[in-house]
Image (spheres, rainbow, N blue to C red):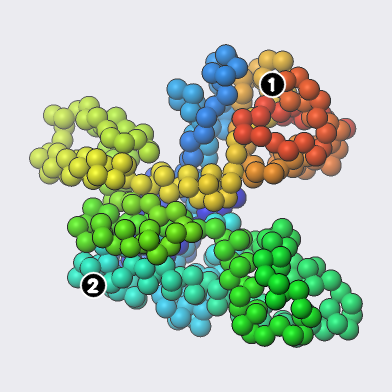
Amino acid sequence: MIAGVVGKTNVGKSTFFSAATLAPAKISNVPFTTIEPNRGVASVRVRCVCKELGVVDNPRNSNCINGIRWVPVELVDVAGLVPDAHKGRGLGNKFLDDLRQADGFIHVVDASGSTDASGNPCEPGARDPVEDVKFLEHEITMWMFQILKKDWDKIVKGVLQLKEDLLGLLCNRLAGLMVSKKHILSALKSDESFSKRVDQWSDDDIMTFVERIRKISKPMVIAANKADIPTAEENIKRLKAEFKDYTVIPCSAEAELALRLAAKKGLISYMPGDKTFEIIKREELTERQKLGLAKIKDLMEKWGSTGVQEAIEAIYLKELKMIPVFPVEDAGKFTDHKGNVLPDVILVQEGATARDLAYKIHTDLGEGFLFAINAKSGQKVGEGYVLKEGDVIKIVSARGIKG
C-alpha cells in the first residue's frame, strides 16, 4: 500500500514529506517546486506482541521500542495541483498520472489560507481552505470520469452486444487506477440507479458512479497544515464541520521537520507522534533555536502534537484499515530459521486471509499453500482463515516452509 501526499502547490507538501521520511525533497515557497514525485519511507506505530508473549524480540524489518513496533510504509510526494488540472493546466496531467499508484491520500491543506488557488503566497486568511479540498475532489473525479467516459461506448457495446460482464469490463478499464473488483462492486451496490441497463446511464449517472469509486478506492485524510499561524484555528474548525466524512488533523510540517532534525543531531529527545520533547543539549542551542523550540512546544500543547505522525497513521491504519501480523517459521519459539524472535511484521488489510499473507511473503508460498498455524493458539488454520490484529502465523507450503 502506498499513500500519496497530495494537494495544491506550495502548501507544504514537500516539507510534510521530508518531516515524515527525513528523505531529501526540494522545498521552496514557489509553485511547482516538486515536478518528479519524491519517494520515501515513513513509519506507523503498532502494538508489538513481544510483551504479550513474554519474549525479547530482535526485529529485522522494523524497530521495536518499549513494545511499540515502528513499521515502514511508503509515501510518495507528487507535483502540486492547480484548478483545471484534468484539462492539463499546470502540471495537471503529470500530477494525475502519478496518482495512479496511490491507494490513499494525505491531502496537505494550507489551513492558514495564505496561498491562493494557484499556489501563490497571499495574505493569511485570504484563501478558504474548504475550497481547496473541494477542488481537489473535483479534479480527481473529473480525471476518473474522463478515463471511464472515453470508453463508455465500448463498455455499452460489450455488455449489450457481446454479452460481456459489466463488472469485468469496469475492472479492466479502471485497473490502472488501483481500483479493485471489490471497490467497483461496492460502488455498484451503493445506488439503485446503477442497476438499470448500462445504455440508460446518463452522464450524471456515470459521474455519480465515479464519485463513489473515488471515495471508496482512494480514501483521504486532511492534514490541516500551517496550524501555527493564527488564521488556521478557525479554518480548522470549518474544515472539520464541512468534511465530517474525513479525518482532519491539525498539522505543522515545519515544526515536525525541525524536531526530527534536532533529534537526529542529539539536541533533543523526541519520537514522531510524541506530545512533547525534551531538550538534552541546551548549551549547544542558539537563542533563535531556543525561541523556535519554545514556539513548537506551545503549538504541541495546543494541538497535542505536530500532527504529521497522526496523519500518516490515520491513512494507513484507519482509512486503509491495515493491521499488523507477525509471520514466523518456528511456531513454538516465534522465530525465523536464524533464531530471530518475531523477526518481521507485515501490514495487511482487514479481511485478509492466511493465503493472502503467504502471497505477501513470497509468491511460491502462496501458490504452494497447504495450511497455516496460529502460533498463539497452536491451532492449524486453512487458507480462508481471516487474519486478526497481532496474529503470529506460520505458513506451511508445498514449496517450502517459510515465515
Which secondary structure lies at badge 1? loop
Badge 2 marks a residue whose secondary structure is: loop
Q: Residue furthest left?
A: 287
Left or right of residue 124, residue 195 in this image: right
* Residue type, numbered disc 2: Ala
State the residue in front, 229 or 346.
229
Quarter the C terminus occupies: top right
- Residue 316's x, y, as percent? 53, 47
User: Which one is nearer the viewer's eye here, 301 or 362?
Assistant: 301
The residue type indicated by label 1 comes to Lys
Marks 1/2: CA–CA distance = 57 Å
Q: For residue 173, which quarter of the picture? A: bottom right
In the shown orientation, is residue 214 left or right of residue 124?
right
* Percent x, y of residue 283: 13, 29
Relative to 129, 354 lies left or right: right
For label 1, the crowd category at 10 Å Cα-Cα, with few meaning under 14, some 14 to 19 and many 20 or more, is some
Residue extending furthest toward the front: 192
Residue at 58% across / 71% down in the picture? 211
Numbered tag placed on residue 126 in the rendering: 2
Report x, y in % for residue 318. Answer: 53, 47
**Which residue is denoted by mark 1 in the rendering?**
376
Q: Earlier in the sequence, mark 1 or mark 2?
A: 2
